[in-house]
Image (spheres, rainbow, N blue to C red):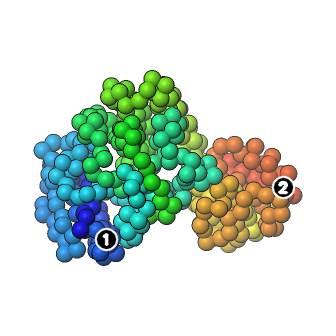
Amino acid sequence: MEKTSIIVPIYRGGKYIDGMIAQIEDCAAKCDSVCALELLFVNDDPSEPVGNLASEMMETKVIETEKNRGIHGARVRGLEQCTGDYVLFLDQDDRIRPGYFVSQLACLGQADAVVCKLLHEGRQFYDTRMPFERVITRDFIISVRNSIISPGQVLIRRDKIPAVWKNTRLSNNGADDWLLWLCMLGAGAELALNPEILFEHVVEGENESINAVHMMASEQEVYDAAASAGLFSPGELAKLRGAVRAAAEDHIRLLSKFQKMFFIYDDWMKQQEEGRYLHQYLKRAGVNSVAIYGDSYIGKRLYYRLQKNGIQVRYFIDRNAAYLEEKIPVYLPQAGLPSVDLVLISLAEAEESIKAELETMTETRICSITDLLASMKRERITL
């Protein structure tokens, strides 16, 4: 029977080990007639040994590194000691569904690796902006961006992992997976697509993927490694250089967006500390029902806060409505939206253009969260 090796680097991640073993055991129960599983933890913190681990459902192994290698070095270390025909790289806080291996192997066919869909920050990542079939391609990954959010989406034939990836040493964590896909594609690898959502990428404060400084440095290292290895033609290398520059610009834009969101949250919390509450202000303004434009960070917080305090949130409005699942309906921006007292724009950017667009579709009052907080501050009523 063929075997799959699951390689999980851990760094001060003892709290994740039991959960990781449990979810891989759930997978093992589903695929015992399809493939055997081997789970390898690569402990990349020599100061905190993990010790031996065991499971009745699969082989387990703990690999203690002699020094901190970083996530790329830890993945390579695990790869050196695994014995599977296939390899799955997981982060310590990742989550996969019990049917992961059955589904991925069924879709792999003769390809060198298979990529599944995922949930990223609690929502589908591939949507109208990032259509799955269009962005998981050689040209897109080389010339636009790394469209594979996490290695956990990809089941790989072990013998198709190129030596150049294993032998490269990256000083910065964050983009070694992009380098892996580039190395594979540069060697002519074929990627199969699995439209099933099998993986959930959890973003926490410690994730390198949200450290803009490290990510930009790591992505530059990826370009340098690809250029040194001669993986691509001069034309494709120029496209990759442009993609790395565009990625840096995206990191800066995201930092700007998060800064704006921080000031919204800060204003919101300050007003609550002073006794001014959104739900009370809305009720005084005659608002008992709302629709929230933007099913994202602030939108979700607004939904729970308003619902809890007697303001009925009837639906979300979002351009990716077809890809979202909520407890309430999610509609595209369109004419004929159900009646509410107020449409509340929860986004930290482009509020005015969104408001102008909505005004062509509805006569309902429209207000952004920033304008609402400013109005509350001017009212200066403490209850």
| Picture quadrant of residue 335 | bottom right
Residue at 23% across, 45% down: 76
Question: Is residue 215 something that shows in the picture?
Answer: yes
Residue at 16% across, 69% down: 54
Q: Residues within 10 Å of mark 1 (few under 14, many from 20)?
A: some
**356 or 132, which is in the foreground?**
132
Residue 264 higher or lower than 107, as above or below: above
- What type is the residue that disc 2 sits on? Met
Left or right: 327 as drawn, with respect to 368: left
Q: Secondary structure at mark 1?
A: loop
Left or right: 378 as drawn, with respect to 138: right
Residue at numbered disc 1: 34
Whether the residues at callouts 2 and 1 have beta carbons within 8 Å, the answer is no
Distance from label 2 to label 1 (Cα)? 53 Å
Residue farthest top in this picture? 234
| Picture quadrant of residue 201 | bottom left
Left or right: 56 as drawn, with respect to 256: left
Residue farthest front in this picture? 110
Residue at numbered disc 2: 361
Q: Between disc 2 and disc 1, whose residue precedes?
A: 1
Left or right: 188 as drawn, with respect to 253: left
**207 or 130, which is in the foreground?**
130
Q: Residues within 10 Å of mark 2 (few under 14, many from 20)?
A: few
Q: Residue 219 location, x and y as percent?
A: 40, 34
Q: Residue 314 location, x and y as percent?
A: 71, 69
- What type is the residue that disc 1 sits on? Val
Residue at 48% across, 41% down: 138
**210 or 169, which is in the foreground?**
169
Q: Secondary structure at mark 2?
A: loop
Question: Is residue 302 something that shows in the picture?
Answer: no
Q: Residue 202 location, x and y as percent?
A: 42, 57
